Image (cartoon, rainbow, N blue to C red):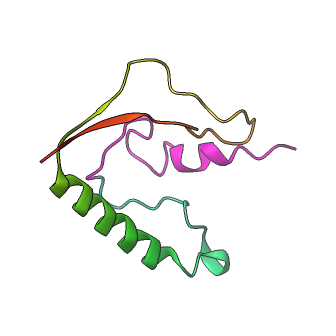
Amino acid sequence: MLSWLGSANRDETIFERPDEFDIARRDNRHLGFGFGPHYCLGASLAALEAQVALRVLLARARSIRRVDDAPLPLHPSFVFRAVTSLPLELEAA
């Protein structure tokens, strides 16, 4: 048996348009921090840290763009997909 962890957040019966990135998605019941008794105790702190980091980054950068249009390198795994590198170019605000 193989668990496809990457497909957990792409269930069409749970998520409308699961293959589409939507930063404003409502009712986002993703499993990124686990579920039930195994839910990550640090989830709220991690979400807050991400909000603060992005807010500061966006305030200090006039523009953010990928360095090139090459395909993104993926972590070799049968269980989940993850980008291993995302070269960006930032222009100071």
Seen from this angle, which residue lies furthest top? Answer: 70
Q: Position of residue 43 (x, y in %)?
A: 50, 74
Q: Which is nearer the eye, 84 or 42?
A: 84
Query: Which of 29 and 49 lies nearest the eye of the viewer?
Result: 49
Residue lying at the far right of the rendered structure: 1
Left or right of 35 on screen, residue 86: left
Left or right side of 9 for 68: left
Of residues 30 and 42, the one nearer the viewer is 42
Is residue 11 found inside the magenta-colored segment of the image?
Answer: yes
Q: Is residue 3 above or below residue 26?
A: above
43 above or below 59?
below
Q: Residue at x 44, y 41 (%)?
A: 18
Residue at the image position 38 percent from the left and 20 percent from the top: 68
Task: Point out the image quarter for the N terminus.
Answer: top right
Where is residue 9 drawn, in percent x and y? Answer: 53, 49
Q: Quick check: is 14 in the magenta stretch? A: yes
Q: Position of residue 42 (x, y in %)?
A: 53, 78
The total number of labels drawn is 0
Q: Kindly report the secondary structure that dominates the magenta region of the rendered protein.
A: loop
The residue under the point 47% across, 52% down is 14
Residue 57 lies in quadrant: bottom left
Front residue of this view, candidates 69 and 34 = 69
Residue name at image x 49 percent, y 42 percent: 12
Give the percent coordinates (x, y) of residue 33: 56, 67
- Which residues lie in the magenta part? 1-24
